[in-house]
Image: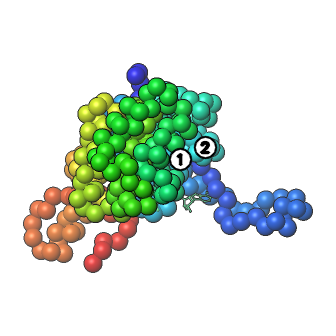
Amino acid sequence: MMGPAVRTVGLTKEFERGRRTMWQRLRREPDRRDRFRAVDGIDLEVQAGEIFGVLGPNGAGKSTTLKMLATLLEPTSGEAEVLGIDVRRHPREVRAHLGAMLSGERSLYWKLTGRENLEYFAALYHVPPRETRARIDGALEEVHLSDRAEDYVERYSTGMRQRLALARALLPDPPLLILDEPTLGLDPQAARDLRERVRALRRQGRTVLLTTHYMEEADQLCDRIAIVDHGRVVALDTPSALKRGRRAQEAARLRVERIETEAVPATLEDVFLSLTGSALRE
Ligand SMILES: Nc1ncnc2c1ncn2[C@@H]1O[C@H](COP(=O)(O)OP(=O)(O)OP(=O)(O)O)[C@@H](O)[C@H]1O
Ligand SMILES: [Mg+2]
Protein backbone atom coordinates (compact mmCIF):
# COMPACT_ATOMS: atom_id res chain seq x y z
CA MET A 1 0.00 0.00 0.00
CA MET A 2 1.24 3.47 -0.79
CA GLY A 3 1.20 6.35 1.68
CA PRO A 4 0.20 6.42 5.32
CA ALA A 5 -2.40 4.01 6.71
CA VAL A 6 -4.29 6.86 8.33
CA ARG A 7 -4.10 10.54 7.55
CA THR A 8 -6.18 13.28 9.08
CA VAL A 9 -5.99 17.02 8.53
CA GLY A 10 -7.86 19.35 10.84
CA LEU A 11 -10.27 16.60 11.80
CA THR A 12 -13.03 18.10 13.92
CA LYS A 13 -16.19 16.88 15.61
CA GLU A 14 -18.67 19.15 17.30
CA PHE A 15 -21.43 17.96 19.57
CA GLU A 16 -24.30 19.81 21.19
CA ARG A 17 -24.46 19.95 24.93
CA GLY A 18 -27.67 18.83 26.60
CA ARG A 19 -30.72 17.65 24.72
CA ARG A 20 -33.40 19.10 22.56
CA THR A 21 -36.85 18.42 23.91
CA MET A 22 -39.68 16.94 21.90
CA TRP A 23 -41.54 20.20 22.48
CA GLN A 24 -38.74 22.26 20.94
CA ARG A 25 -38.60 19.93 17.97
CA LEU A 26 -42.35 19.99 17.42
CA ARG A 27 -42.45 23.76 17.56
CA ARG A 28 -39.45 23.86 15.24
CA GLU A 29 -37.68 26.20 17.60
CA PRO A 30 -34.15 27.04 16.51
CA ASP A 31 -31.54 24.84 18.14
CA ARG A 32 -29.89 27.11 20.71
CA ARG A 33 -27.81 24.50 22.40
CA ASP A 34 -24.13 25.14 22.93
CA ARG A 35 -21.85 23.31 20.59
CA PHE A 36 -18.47 22.16 21.74
CA ARG A 37 -15.57 20.57 19.95
CA ALA A 38 -14.92 17.06 21.21
CA VAL A 39 -12.25 16.75 18.50
CA ASP A 40 -10.65 20.06 17.65
CA GLY A 41 -8.53 19.91 14.53
CA ILE A 42 -6.51 16.73 14.77
CA ASP A 43 -3.64 16.13 12.34
CA LEU A 44 -2.33 12.59 12.30
CA GLU A 45 -0.28 10.38 10.03
CA VAL A 46 -0.11 6.76 10.99
CA GLN A 47 2.48 4.92 8.92
CA ALA A 48 1.76 1.52 7.45
CA GLY A 49 3.12 -1.24 9.68
CA GLU A 50 3.32 0.69 12.92
CA ILE A 51 1.52 0.39 16.21
CA PHE A 52 0.26 3.87 16.93
CA GLY A 53 -1.16 4.75 20.33
CA VAL A 54 -3.53 7.55 21.29
CA LEU A 55 -3.29 8.52 24.94
CA GLY A 56 -5.36 11.06 26.81
CA PRO A 57 -7.55 11.69 29.83
CA ASN A 58 -11.26 10.81 29.91
CA GLY A 59 -13.25 12.89 27.46
CA ALA A 60 -10.18 13.94 25.45
CA GLY A 61 -11.80 12.87 22.20
CA LYS A 62 -9.99 9.58 21.55
CA SER A 63 -13.03 7.40 20.93
CA THR A 64 -14.70 10.11 18.89
CA THR A 65 -11.62 10.30 16.66
CA LEU A 66 -11.53 6.54 16.19
CA LYS A 67 -15.25 6.43 15.44
CA MET A 68 -14.84 9.02 12.70
CA LEU A 69 -12.04 6.96 11.17
CA ALA A 70 -14.20 3.85 11.37
CA THR A 71 -17.03 5.82 9.67
CA LEU A 72 -19.40 5.41 12.64
CA LEU A 73 -19.50 9.19 13.14
CA GLU A 74 -19.39 11.85 10.49
CA PRO A 75 -16.74 14.56 10.94
CA THR A 76 -17.97 18.13 11.34
CA SER A 77 -15.02 19.33 9.30
CA GLY A 78 -11.55 18.38 8.24
CA GLU A 79 -10.25 15.47 6.22
CA ALA A 80 -9.61 11.86 7.03
CA GLU A 81 -8.24 9.11 4.84
CA VAL A 82 -8.00 5.48 5.84
CA LEU A 83 -5.75 3.37 3.60
CA GLY A 84 -5.89 6.20 1.13
CA ILE A 85 -9.69 6.18 1.06
CA ASP A 86 -11.67 9.26 2.05
CA VAL A 87 -13.94 8.41 4.99
CA ARG A 88 -16.61 10.91 4.02
CA ARG A 89 -16.79 10.12 0.35
CA HIS A 90 -16.36 6.34 0.48
CA PRO A 91 -17.43 5.11 3.92
CA ARG A 92 -18.50 1.68 2.65
CA GLU A 93 -15.16 1.07 1.07
CA VAL A 94 -13.39 2.12 4.26
CA ARG A 95 -15.51 -0.29 6.28
CA ALA A 96 -14.69 -3.15 3.94
CA HIS A 97 -10.94 -2.72 4.52
CA LEU A 98 -10.92 -2.00 8.20
CA GLY A 99 -11.03 -4.09 11.34
CA ALA A 100 -12.45 -2.16 14.27
CA MET A 101 -13.02 -2.91 17.91
CA LEU A 102 -14.69 0.12 19.42
CA SER A 103 -16.17 0.71 22.83
CA GLY A 104 -19.91 0.27 22.94
CA GLU A 105 -19.67 -1.74 19.77
CA ARG A 106 -18.23 -4.81 21.35
CA SER A 107 -21.54 -6.60 21.42
CA LEU A 108 -21.42 -10.29 20.78
CA TYR A 109 -24.35 -12.68 20.85
CA TRP A 110 -24.22 -14.44 24.18
CA LYS A 111 -26.62 -17.22 23.17
CA LEU A 112 -24.41 -18.18 20.25
CA THR A 113 -21.07 -19.94 20.36
CA GLY A 114 -17.85 -18.16 19.56
CA ARG A 115 -17.79 -19.73 16.12
CA GLU A 116 -21.44 -18.91 15.42
CA ASN A 117 -20.76 -15.31 16.33
CA LEU A 118 -17.94 -15.17 13.82
CA GLU A 119 -20.07 -16.86 11.15
CA TYR A 120 -22.74 -14.26 11.67
CA PHE A 121 -20.32 -11.34 11.45
CA ALA A 122 -18.48 -12.86 8.47
CA ALA A 123 -21.77 -12.79 6.57
CA LEU A 124 -22.41 -9.25 7.75
CA TYR A 125 -18.96 -8.11 6.62
CA HIS A 126 -19.37 -9.78 3.22
CA VAL A 127 -16.50 -12.20 3.68
CA PRO A 128 -16.59 -14.38 0.54
CA PRO A 129 -18.46 -17.59 1.52
CA ARG A 130 -15.70 -19.80 0.17
CA GLU A 131 -13.16 -18.11 2.45
CA THR A 132 -15.34 -17.90 5.54
CA ARG A 133 -14.27 -21.19 7.13
CA ALA A 134 -10.55 -20.47 6.75
CA ARG A 135 -10.89 -16.86 7.92
CA ILE A 136 -12.79 -17.91 11.04
CA ASP A 137 -10.31 -20.67 11.87
CA GLY A 138 -7.45 -18.25 11.31
CA ALA A 139 -9.00 -15.55 13.49
CA LEU A 140 -9.76 -18.03 16.29
CA GLU A 141 -6.22 -19.32 16.13
CA GLU A 142 -4.89 -15.77 16.21
CA VAL A 143 -6.61 -15.00 19.52
CA HIS A 144 -6.04 -18.48 20.99
CA LEU A 145 -9.70 -19.39 21.16
CA SER A 146 -9.75 -22.38 18.81
CA ASP A 147 -10.41 -24.82 21.66
CA ARG A 148 -13.32 -22.78 23.03
CA ALA A 149 -14.97 -21.97 19.70
CA GLU A 150 -17.93 -24.29 20.31
CA ASP A 151 -18.75 -22.83 23.75
CA TYR A 152 -21.51 -20.32 24.28
CA VAL A 153 -20.21 -16.78 24.62
CA GLU A 154 -22.23 -16.38 27.83
CA ARG A 155 -19.80 -18.85 29.37
CA TYR A 156 -16.75 -16.90 28.25
CA SER A 157 -14.72 -14.80 30.66
CA THR A 158 -14.30 -11.06 30.02
CA GLY A 159 -10.88 -11.67 28.53
CA MET A 160 -12.19 -14.35 26.20
CA ARG A 161 -14.98 -12.06 25.01
CA GLN A 162 -12.45 -9.34 24.38
CA ARG A 163 -10.37 -11.76 22.34
CA LEU A 164 -13.41 -12.90 20.40
CA ALA A 165 -14.15 -9.24 19.62
CA LEU A 166 -10.61 -8.97 18.27
CA ALA A 167 -11.15 -12.13 16.20
CA ARG A 168 -14.27 -10.50 14.81
CA ALA A 169 -12.25 -7.43 13.84
CA LEU A 170 -9.79 -9.71 12.03
CA LEU A 171 -12.44 -11.32 9.83
CA PRO A 172 -12.11 -8.92 6.88
CA ASP A 173 -8.35 -9.74 6.94
CA PRO A 174 -7.77 -6.01 7.35
CA PRO A 175 -4.44 -4.27 6.75
CA LEU A 176 -5.48 -1.77 9.46
CA LEU A 177 -6.97 -2.40 12.89
CA ILE A 178 -8.54 0.30 15.03
CA LEU A 179 -8.80 -0.78 18.66
CA ASP A 180 -10.37 1.39 21.35
CA GLU A 181 -8.97 0.35 24.73
CA PRO A 182 -8.48 -3.26 23.74
CA THR A 183 -7.13 -4.28 27.15
CA LEU A 184 -9.82 -2.55 29.23
CA GLY A 185 -10.95 -4.85 32.01
CA LEU A 186 -8.39 -7.54 31.33
CA ASP A 187 -6.25 -9.07 34.06
CA PRO A 188 -2.50 -8.50 33.73
CA GLN A 189 -1.88 -11.87 32.11
CA ALA A 190 -4.74 -11.50 29.62
CA ALA A 191 -3.61 -7.94 28.84
CA ARG A 192 -0.07 -9.17 28.21
CA ASP A 193 -1.49 -11.83 25.98
CA LEU A 194 -3.52 -9.35 23.98
CA ARG A 195 -0.49 -7.08 23.59
CA GLU A 196 1.40 -10.05 22.23
CA ARG A 197 -1.45 -10.62 19.74
CA VAL A 198 -1.17 -6.97 18.69
CA ARG A 199 2.59 -7.34 18.17
CA ALA A 200 1.92 -10.44 16.07
CA LEU A 201 -0.42 -8.37 13.90
CA ARG A 202 2.38 -5.90 13.31
CA ARG A 203 4.73 -8.74 12.38
CA GLN A 204 2.20 -9.74 9.73
CA GLY A 205 2.61 -6.26 8.29
CA ARG A 206 -0.64 -4.84 9.61
CA THR A 207 -1.07 -1.37 11.05
CA VAL A 208 -2.64 -0.96 14.48
CA LEU A 209 -4.15 2.25 15.80
CA LEU A 210 -5.19 1.92 19.42
CA THR A 211 -6.12 3.90 22.50
CA THR A 212 -5.19 3.03 26.04
CA HIS A 213 -5.09 4.48 29.53
CA TYR A 214 -2.21 2.29 30.57
CA MET A 215 1.11 4.15 30.33
CA GLU A 216 3.12 0.96 30.57
CA GLU A 217 1.17 -0.50 27.73
CA ALA A 218 1.66 2.52 25.50
CA ASP A 219 5.34 2.57 26.37
CA GLN A 220 5.98 -1.08 25.62
CA LEU A 221 3.68 -1.55 22.69
CA CYS A 222 3.57 1.58 20.58
CA ASP A 223 6.05 2.72 17.97
CA ARG A 224 4.63 6.21 18.26
CA ILE A 225 2.18 7.93 20.54
CA ALA A 226 -0.07 10.94 20.23
CA ILE A 227 -1.13 12.52 23.50
CA VAL A 228 -4.53 14.10 23.08
CA ASP A 229 -6.15 16.59 25.43
CA HIS A 230 -9.34 18.59 24.90
CA GLY A 231 -9.61 17.31 21.35
CA ARG A 232 -6.11 18.37 20.33
CA VAL A 233 -2.82 16.62 19.82
CA VAL A 234 -0.48 18.06 22.45
CA ALA A 235 2.48 15.79 21.71
CA LEU A 236 3.36 13.20 19.12
CA ASP A 237 6.53 11.12 19.04
CA THR A 238 8.13 7.81 19.95
CA PRO A 239 7.82 6.85 23.62
CA SER A 240 11.55 7.37 24.19
CA ALA A 241 11.61 10.78 22.50
CA LEU A 242 8.61 11.84 24.57
CA LYS A 243 10.42 10.78 27.72
CA ARG A 244 13.50 12.76 26.73
CA GLY A 245 11.40 15.89 26.26
CA ARG A 246 12.01 18.93 28.47
CA ARG A 247 8.65 18.98 30.19
CA ALA A 248 8.85 15.27 30.84
CA GLN A 249 12.26 15.74 32.44
CA GLU A 250 10.86 18.52 34.61
CA ALA A 251 7.98 16.35 35.74
CA ALA A 252 10.43 13.56 36.51
CA ARG A 253 12.59 15.96 38.53
CA LEU A 254 9.55 17.01 40.49
CA ARG A 255 8.87 13.40 41.25
CA VAL A 256 12.49 12.90 42.26
CA GLU A 257 12.41 15.85 44.63
CA ARG A 258 9.46 14.34 46.39
CA ILE A 259 11.14 11.05 46.98
CA GLU A 260 14.54 12.71 47.52
CA THR A 261 16.69 10.64 45.27
CA GLU A 262 18.54 11.63 42.15
CA ALA A 263 18.08 11.34 38.42
CA VAL A 264 15.07 9.16 37.93
CA PRO A 265 14.44 8.89 34.20
CA ALA A 266 11.18 10.31 32.93
CA THR A 267 8.36 7.86 32.56
CA LEU A 268 5.58 8.16 30.07
CA GLU A 269 3.38 9.01 33.01
CA ASP A 270 5.55 12.10 33.64
CA VAL A 271 5.09 13.12 30.03
CA PHE A 272 1.36 12.65 30.30
CA LEU A 273 1.09 14.63 33.52
CA SER A 274 3.22 17.47 32.26
CA LEU A 275 1.14 17.81 29.11
CA THR A 276 -2.39 17.24 30.32
CA GLY A 277 -1.88 19.06 33.61
CA SER A 278 -3.47 16.34 35.68
CA ALA A 279 -2.21 16.60 39.24
CA LEU A 280 0.34 14.11 40.46
CA ARG A 281 -1.38 11.47 42.48
CA GLU A 282 -0.29 11.20 46.11
N1 LIG B 1 -22.65 11.18 20.80
C1 LIG B 1 -22.21 12.19 21.58
N2 LIG B 1 -22.98 13.27 21.80
C2 LIG B 1 -22.55 14.29 22.56
N3 LIG B 1 -21.35 14.33 23.14
C3 LIG B 1 -20.53 13.28 22.95
C4 LIG B 1 -20.91 12.15 22.17
N4 LIG B 1 -19.89 11.27 22.16
C5 LIG B 1 -18.92 11.82 22.91
N5 LIG B 1 -19.29 13.02 23.38
C6 LIG B 1 -18.47 13.93 24.20
O1 LIG B 1 -17.26 14.18 23.50
C7 LIG B 1 -16.17 14.28 24.41
C8 LIG B 1 -15.11 13.28 24.00
O2 LIG B 1 -15.59 11.96 24.22
P1 LIG B 1 -14.74 10.66 23.84
O3 LIG B 1 -15.61 9.49 24.11
O4 LIG B 1 -14.20 10.83 22.47
O5 LIG B 1 -13.54 10.74 24.88
P2 LIG B 1 -12.38 9.69 25.16
O6 LIG B 1 -11.10 10.40 24.95
O7 LIG B 1 -12.62 8.45 24.39
O8 LIG B 1 -12.57 9.42 26.72
P3 LIG B 1 -12.39 8.08 27.57
O9 LIG B 1 -10.97 8.03 27.95
O10 LIG B 1 -13.28 8.33 28.76
O11 LIG B 1 -12.85 6.93 26.74
C9 LIG B 1 -16.75 14.05 25.79
O12 LIG B 1 -16.99 15.30 26.37
C10 LIG B 1 -18.06 13.32 25.51
O13 LIG B 1 -19.01 13.57 26.50
MG1 LIG C 1 -12.98 6.49 24.90
- In terms of image quadrants, where is residue 135? top left
Residue drawn 60% across the image and 46% down it: 73
Residue drawn 12% across the image and 74% down it: 260
Camera sees residue 231: no
- The residue at which mark 2 appears reads as 75
The colour scheme used to paint the residues is rainbow
- The residue at which mark 1 appears reads as 67
Q: Type of residue at label 2?
A: Pro
Instruction: Report the quarter where the N terminus lies.
Output: top left
Residue 246: x and y in percent read: 25, 54
Q: Type of residue at label 1?
A: Lys
Residue 171 versus residue 55 in the image, above or below: above
Residue reaching furthest left? Answer: 262
Residue 65: x and y in percent read: 51, 48
Does the residue tagged 1 have its C-beta within 8 Å of any atom of ligand 1? yes
Residue drawn 50% across the image and 28% down it: 129
Q: Earlier in the sequence, mark 2 or mark 1?
A: 1
Residue 75: x and y in percent read: 61, 43
Residue 218, label in figure:
none
Density class for disc 2 (Cα within 10 Å; few <14, some 14-19, many ≥20) is: many
Residue placed most toward the observer, 207 or 243: 207
Q: Pointers 2 and 1 in contact (CB under 8 A)?
A: no
Left or right, 104 with respect to 50, comes to: right
